[in-house]
Amino acid sequence: ILNVEQSPQSLHVQEGDSTNFTCSFPSSNFYALHWYRWETAKSPEALFVMTLNGDEKKKGRISATLNTKEGYSYLYIKGSQPEDSATYLCAWVSGTYKYIFGTGTRLKVLA
Amino acid sequence: EAGVAQSPRYKIIEKRQSVAFWCNPISGHATLYWYQQILGQGPKLLIQFQNNGVVDDSQLPKDRFSAERLKGVDSTLKIQPAKLEDSAVYLCASSLGTFTGELFFGEGSRLTVL
């Protein structure tokens, strides 16, 4: 069974804090790693699509890194704001183009 | 550009009843996915279409779930009869192609089975 795990499951941080989450995935048969943000009552939106070992992507205060050899990706949020409150999902894409999602990390930023 | 449209947003039914969800993907997107997201779990692929052909339906409970994508555009997912464990958010997503492209999601249809 192919497993994609995310940690922590949930966390609360204060406004202005920086935080990071982990996505662990199988290191073999890797094709791509996606990060999505899912706000309540909205549709999940893609943050990053990462394909190369060592990739680093950045969008505003959010950045992500990728280590395909050891099978993990980190998502960082610098200076969290209440509008960052959401569930962050990662999806591992296999060499046969199957998407397997993690269970997500639920972030709550307290003002 | 219009996003992925889904309806209904919410549906409450009794077990053994039937329900249907509708999805209209982004124009020009060849690949359409239906995911089931049960509370506390990650989205699980139910079925993937490439145009109007099925690419993967290995996790679709075919005794009660069915899906079609007529003319390679809109899609309908049906559950008949529903069970309590079918309570979930049903997400439709589309992408330009099959291979690793970014997924564009609808807002989901939340089903509660009583």
Image: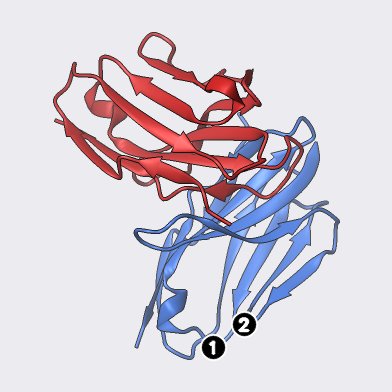
Chain colours: A blue, B red
Q: Secondary structure at mark 1?
A: loop
Task: Please tell me whether residue A5 is drawn above or below residue A98 in the rendered image.
Answer: below
Say whether marks 1 and 2 touch (CB < 8 Å): yes
- Residue B43: % across, % down: 48, 41
- Residue B85: % across, % down: 28, 27
- Residue A18: % across, % down: 55, 84
**Chain ID of residue with mark 2:** A
- Looking at the image, residue B109 sits to the left or right of residue A93; the answer is left
Residue position for label 1: A79
Res. A28 in view: no
Q: Are marks 1 and 2 on the same chain?
A: yes
N-terminal of the two: label 1 or label 2?
Answer: 2
Residue position for label 2: A61
Res. A29 in view: yes
Which of the two marks, 1 or 2, is nearer to us in this view? Answer: 2
Which residue sits at x=59%, y=84%? Answer: A78
Q: Quadrant of residue B57?
A: top right
Which residue sits at x=29%, y=15%? Answer: B80
**Chain ID of residue with mark 1:** A
